[in-house]
Amino acid sequence: MKNKNIYDKIFEKKCNVCGKTLLASKTGNGECPHCGWYNNRLGEINENMVIFPNLVSLNKAKKLYKENRLIKPDLNDFLEAFEFYGETGFEYKNLMFCLFRHGDNGIEMGWGPNDDEVAYFKDKEDFIKNAKIDNEYVRDIWNKVENPCYL
Ligand SMILES: [Zn+2]
């Protein structure tokens, strides 16, 4: 018989977002194969916060699911995820854009085929207001970016 440990996905549980069944670890963590939500305790306690490894809060995910929309972060959710975790990225026009912490509240955004392009922002608000890709504000093209993620 195979040994089981607490990390094995051995418990059935109902997904917090879509209500369908998934297999979770003893601690209740597990990704839902139906809606993609990563069920996890910390995200359940902090239902209005963006908590790794999800990119939107639990309550927002529930709302999006109910409205039959994709569980995808808006720019605010994405930057909240960044603030929580410190390294996030997204793709746009076949380029990868990576955000890193810079100083206390600052954000460094790097991109380019050789990772040689870089821009700095003093905080989240500065990023929302001023971050640009070519001549477009990131906030204006956000619904066209792909694969927002933790790095
Ligand atoms: Zn689900």
Image (tube, rainbow, N blue to C red):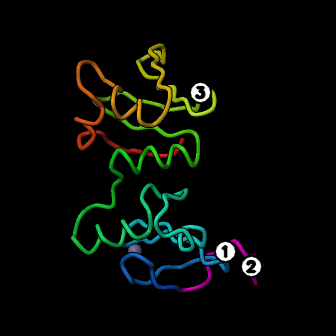
Q: Position of residue 130 (x, y in %)?
A: 34, 25
The magenta segment is 1-12
Q: For the residue marked with disc 1, what is the amino acid? A: Asp
Residue 86 in the magenta stretch? The answer is no
Which residue is at a point 40% across and 65% down the rendered structure image? 36
Q: Position of residue 86 (x, y in %)?
A: 58, 40
Of marks 3 and 2, which one's residue comes earlier in the chain? 2
Label placed on residue 8: 1
Label placed on residue 17: none
Residue 92 location, quadrant = top left
CA gap, disc 3 and disc 1: 37 Å
CA gap, disc 1 and disc 2: 6 Å
Q: Are marks 3 and 1 in contact (CB under 8 Å)?
A: no
Crowding at label 1, few (<14), some or many (≥20) Cα neighbours within 10 Å? some
Q: Nearer the viewer, mark 3 or mark 1?
A: 3
Q: For the residue marked with disc 3, what is the amino acid? A: His
Q: Are marks 1 and 2 in contact (CB under 8 Å)?
A: yes
CA gap, disc 3 and disc 2: 42 Å
| Quarter in which the C terminus is drawn | top right
Along the viewing direction, whichever of 30 and 79 lies nearer the viewer: 79
Residue at the disc numbered 3: 102
Q: Is residue 116 above or below residue 52?
A: above
Along the viewing direction, whichever of 104 and 35 lies nearer the viewer: 104
Crowding at label 3, few (<14), some or many (≥20) Cα neighbours within 10 Å? some
Q: Is residue 24 found left or right of 74 in the rendered image? A: right
Along the viewing direction, whichever of 71 and 63 lies nearer the viewer: 63
Residue at the disc numbered 2: 4
